[in-house]
Amino acid sequence: MMSRNQREKSVNILHVDDEPDFADMAAAFLERENERFEVETVHDANEGLDLITAEDYDCIISDYDMPHMDGLDLLTAVREEYPDLPFILFTGRGSEEIASDAISVGVTDYLKKGTGTDQYELLANRITNAVGQVWTEQQLDTERQRFQILFDHLSQATVEVEYQDDEPVIKRVNPAFEDTFGYDADDLVGHSLDNYIVPESQSNGATEINQRVQAGASIDAEEVTRETTDGLRDFLLQNAVYDDGSGGFAVYTNITDRKEQQHKLERQNTRLQALFEYFPEPTVSYAYRNSAPHVTDVNEAFVDTFGHKKGTALGTDIDELVVPPDRREEAQRIDDRIKAGELIDEDLRRQAADGFGEFRFRNIRVPDDGEIDGYGVYQDITAYKNREQELARQNDLFKKAQDIASVGAWEHDTMTDEVMWSAQVYEIHDLPQETEVTPEQALDFYHPDDRPAIRDALRSAVEDGEQYDIEARILASDDEVRWVRTRGDPQVEDGSTVRVRGTLQDITDLKKRQADLQRERDRLDEFAGIVTHDLRNPLNVVEGRLELAREECDSEHLNQVDTAIGRMNRIIDDMLWLAREGRDIGSTEPVEIENAVESAWCLVADNTDEAELRYAGDTNKLPAIRADRDRVCQLFENLLQNAVEHGGEDVTITVGALDSGFYLEDDGPGISKSGDASLFDAGYSTSEHGTGLGLSIVRRVAQAHGWDVRVTDSSEDGVRLEITGVEVGAT
C-alpha cells in the first residue's frame, strides 16, 4: 500500500523487449492503466543496461528470450548494482526452470505474456505493488533513522532491554544514560541492567517492576532510587513495553532536584510528543466521550495511511473515521472492552485511504490522565496477509508439483529416532498414510541388494554430515519392484546432525525407458557388427577379384564394377556412422564456420577438380557457432558431397550466414522434390552415384544439436539447404 506522497509521485519504468511493436503497445496500455506511469522502451538488453546505469528508474520490465543478452543475464547484471530495484520478467517463453532461475537470481515478479489486454492490468498491478513495497521500505528506513536520532538526542537517560531468564539485559543506551550513570555503553551492552544500577535495598522493587513489564504493563511515572558512579540518585522511571513483554525502553529522569525534575518533565513531554509524531506506525490518542473513543491527536503515519488530516480528525469518533459500515458492531464491542480496561491485540479490517486494509490493532492505556485515556496503534499488515495468501498458493502449487512428479519428502530425526513421510512417500510405497514407520522398517522396504548402500549413505549423513543421492529399488506392498531416487541432506546444529531430510522420487518409468533405449542401442550395435562383418568381408573378396580380373583382361565393365564397389563402401560407412555415432553429440565449443567448411572441402575436393567453393559476402561475416566440432565437420562434408554428387563436377557451391544459422546452396539442376521431407529419408538419392544417406546424416547431426534443417530452391536454380536454430556468435 502506497502512502499519500507515494501516490502523487510518477513511476518511471523501463521496458526491455526485442520486439518494438509489442514494447510500444505494452507501454501504451500501461500508461492508460495508471496515469502516473511513464514508460520508456528499449529493444536491446545491453542498451537497457546502459540506460539503467545512467537514469533513475522505479521498475524494470524485461522479456526473457532476447539476442545477445537474455532477461536472466540482464537481471543478474542489474542485481549486482541495484539489489532492491523492482525487476519483473514479462516473457512469452516461460518454464518452471526459467522461473526458478529468475527467483534464485532475485527477480521481483515473474509474469508470462498472454493474449488480450487483461494482462496489462495485471502487469500494472504487479508494478504498483513492487514499487510501493520498495518505497515503503525506504520510508520505513527513514523513519527508523529518525527514531534512532530521537533516541540518541533524548535528554533523559534511556535504555533498551530484553529479558533473558527474567534478567533485563541491556541492548543499547543513549548518551544521556552514559552521562547520568557514569558507564560506557560498551561496558553495559549484554549485561543485566539491575546488576549495574539497582542498589541492594531496591532489589525487591526492581524484581516487581520486571515482572510487571514482562506481563505487558506500562510504568507511567514511578519514583525509584538507582546507583550511579557518583552515588545514589532519585529518578522518575517511565517505560514503553514490547507487545509480547519481552523487553522495552526505560526512561530515567533525575528528580533529585525537584526544580530540575519539573524542567526535565516538561522536556520529556516534548520528546515523547516528538516520539509520537515520528513513530512509524499509524497511532491515535483518544478520550472516551459518551462511551465512544474520540480523537485527541493523530501522528503523520495515521494521516498518510487513513487519509484524514489532523485538523478534521480531532474530536471525531474514531469509528466514524476508520471502521467500515459492516464492522460497526464489532468495533463497538472492542470499544466497550477498552473502556473496561482490557488490552486489545487483534487483527482488524479497516477503511484506509487506498481502500480496505488489514491492521494489527493494539491499545495502550493511560490511566489517571486528565486529557487522554490511551493510544491506539494500527500496524498495517496488508502486505503480510497478502504474502500469507501467496505462500499458501505456492505451497498448494508445490504440492501439486510433487504429485505430478511423484516426489515425496521425508525426515529422520536423529534425536528421537522418529521418521516422518509425506503423503507422496506413502503413495510410492503403496501404504496407508496412518502407517507408522521406524528407521529399520523404512530400510526394510528397499530391495535386499540395495539396503547396504542406503544404510551406509544414511550413516555417513548422520556421522559425517555428507549428502547423498542414490538410485535404488523398493518393494511395494504387493511385492512389486519399483525404482526410486532418494536424496538425503543432513541438518547440522552445534557440530551434530540433528535430522536428515530428503526426497523420494519414483523413477520406475524412467528406468523402463532407459532399458528400452539401451535395448535399441544394443540392436543398433548388433546391426553395425553385422554390416561390418557380413558385408565388408564379401565386399573385400569382390575388390580382390576385381584386381585379379584387371590383370587378365581390360574391360569397361570392370570400371563399372569398381564404381559400384566404391558406392557400396560409402553406403556401409554412412550406415555405420548413423548406427554408432549419429545418435548423440559430444561436448560443444565455439566453432568457426569457415574453418569447418574448409576442413570438409579438403576431403570432398580430392574427388573433383572443377567444383568451386565460395562464400557469400566477406568471410568474416560468417559467425562462430557453438557445436560439436567433429559432428559439424561431418555435416559440412555430407552437404558438400551431396552438392557435388547432384550438381555435377563443375558445380559452384556457396556458403553464407543467416540470422540464426547458415546455408549452403549450389547452381546445379535442382531437385524436383525441393522442400519435401522425404529428401532426408535414408536411401533417397537422385544421383546414380549417391548413397542416399548424406542428407539423412545431415538431419541427424542437426537434430542432435537441436537445429532445424530444410531444403529450398537456390537463387542459382539449384538447391539451398538452410540450418537454423543455431547458437550463433558463440565465444
Image: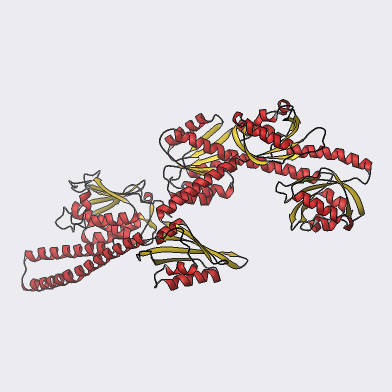
Location of the N terminus (image quadrant): top right
Measured as percent of width and height from the top left, residue 72 is found at 48, 48
Q: Nearer the viewer, residue 726 or 312?
A: 312
Taking the image as shown, residue 409 lies to the left or right of residue 614, namely right
Q: Is residue 74 above or below residue 492?
A: above
Taking the image as shown, residue 84 lies to the left or right of residue 543, namely right
Residue at 80 percent of width and 38 percent of height = 367
Q: Nearer the viewer, residue 512 or 72?
A: 512
Residue 289, quarter of the rendered image: top right
Residue at 7 percent of width and 64 percent of height = 556
Location of the C terminus (image quadrant): bottom left
- Picture mark count: 0
Asked whether the viewer can see residue 97, the reply is no
Q: Is residue 628 above or below residue 309?
A: below
Q: Nearer the viewer, residue 643 or 489?
A: 489
Measured as percent of width and height from the top left, residue 569 is found at 18, 65
Q: Nearer the viewer, residue 79 or 254?
A: 254
Measured as percent of width and height from the top left, residue 261 is found at 90, 42
Residue that protrudes farthest toward the top in the picture: 312
Asked whether the viewer can see residue 645, the reply is yes
Measured as percent of width and height from the top left, residue 244 is found at 70, 48
What colour scheme has been applied to the protein in the rendered image? secondary structure
Residue at 72 percent of width and 41 percent of height = 343
